[in-house]
C-alpha cells in the first residue's frame, strides 16, 4: 500500500528524504542508545550513502541526528560546524559492509562517557528507517514508537518480569522482539511501547539481576 507520505515525502530539510531525513533519524536513534550527545562517533557509509552521501547531505544529516536535531530542523544545514563547536568528534568513512544490506546503510560507533554503542541502520525512503543491528545483535526496529532496548541473560521469566513491571504502571506494549546469540547466553530485548516508560518502571527493570544496558529511546519518526 502506498501512503501519502510516500508520495509527498516527510517534512524535512532537503535535499533527499532517503539521504537526509532517514539518515538524520538513524543518527537520532544512535544518540538515544548512549543517552544523549556522544563525545565521538565513527560513521561508516555503505552503498549509495558512500557514493552520493556527501552531495545529498548524508554527513550533515547524521551529525544533526547525533546532536538531537530532527529532519525538519534548519540547523541541519550547519550541523558539521555545530558538532565541532559542541565538542562532538566525528569521523566519516566509506565502506562495504559484509552480507546483504540496503544501499542506504550506515554503521555508527559512538561513545559517551562510559557508554558505547554500535548501530547499523538503513534509510528506506520517505524518511523511514530500519535499525537492523545493535551491538552485534540482529534487530528490526524503526523508531516509530518509544522503545526499550536492553541486554539480558537468556533465563526463564525475564520477559514476564519486564512485562509485569510495565503493566503495573499501565504502560502498554505494542511489540516485543528478542534476539539471542545462543541458548543461555546474552539476548537483546526490544520493547516498543505506546508511551514512554516512567522513571519508576525503568528503575524496577534496571534492578532485575539478569538485565544490563537498559536504554529508553523516545519516538523519533
Image (cartoon, rainbow, N blue to C red):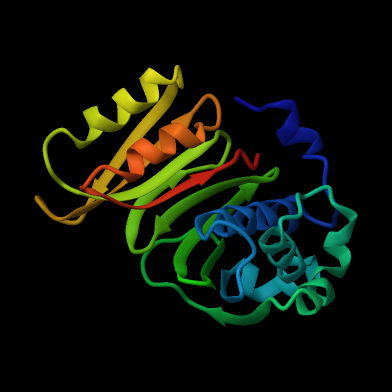
**The C terminus lies in which quarter of the figure?**
top right
11 to the left or right of 163: right
Q: Residue at x 81, y 35 (%)?
A: 8
Residue 34 percent location from the top left of the image: 52, 60
**Observer-nearest residue: 77 or 162?**
162
Q: Is residue 100 left or right of residue 195?
A: left
Left or right: residue 21 compared with residue 133:
right
Q: Quadrant of residue 51?
A: bottom right
Query: Looking at the image, is 215 positioned above or below residue 164?
Result: below
Q: Quadrant of the N terminus?
A: top right
Residue 79 drawn at (x, y percent): 81, 68
> Eyeballing the image, is 9 above or below 38?
above
Position above or below: 162 against 186? above
Q: Identify which residue is drawn at 64% across, 42% down.
A: 220
What x and y, as percent, mark residue 80? 79, 74
Image point (44%, 41%), residue name: 148
- Residue 124 vs residue 218, the one in the foreground: 218
Q: Position of 209 compared to 16: left or right?
A: left
Residue located at (50% from left, 56% from top): 33
Give the image location of residue 169, x and y in percent: 43, 21
In this view, the residue in front, 152 or 6, is 152
- How many callouts does the rendering have? 0
Work out whether residue 184 or residue 204 is closer to the camera in this orientation and state it. 204
Amino acid at each position: 500500500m502506498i501512503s501519502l507520505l510516500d508520495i509527498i515525502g516527510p517534512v524535512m530539510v532537503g535535499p533527499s528524504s532517503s539521504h537526509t531525513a532517514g539518515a538524520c533519524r538513524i543518527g537520532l536513534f544512535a544518540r538515544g542508545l548512549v543517552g544523549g550527545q556522544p563525545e565521538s562517533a565513527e560513521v561508516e557509509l555503505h552503498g549509495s550513502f558512500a557514493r552520493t552521501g556527501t552531495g545529498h547531505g548524508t554527513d550533515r544529516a547524521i551529525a544533526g541526528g547525533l546532536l538531537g536535531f530532527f529532519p525538519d530542523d534548519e540547523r541541519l544545514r550547519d550541523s558539521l560546524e555545530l558538532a565541532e563547536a559542541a565538542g562532538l568528534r566525528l569521523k566519516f568513512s566509506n565502506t562495504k559492509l559484509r552480507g546483504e544490506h540496503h544501499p542506504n546503510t550506515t554503521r555508527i560507533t559512538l561513545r559517551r562517557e562510559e557508554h558505547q554503542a554500535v548501530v547499523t541502520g538503513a534509510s528506506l525512503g520517505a524518511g523511514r528507517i530500519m535499525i537492523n543491528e545493535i551491538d552485534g545483535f540482529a534487530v528490526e526496529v524503526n523508531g516509530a514508537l518509544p522503545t526499550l532496548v536492553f541486554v539480558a541473560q537468556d533465563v526463564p521469566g525475564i520477559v514476564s518480569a519486564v512485562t509485569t513491571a510495565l503493566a503495573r504502571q499501565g504502560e502498554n506494549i505494542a511489540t516485543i522482539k528478542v534476539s539471542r546469540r545462543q541458548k543461555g547466553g546474552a539476548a537483546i530485548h526490544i520493547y516498543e511501547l505506546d508511551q514512554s516508560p516512567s522513571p519508576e518502571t525503568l528503575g524496577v527493570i534496571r534492578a532485575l539481576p539478569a538485565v544490563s544496558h537498559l536504554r529508553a529511546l523516545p519516538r523519533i519518526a
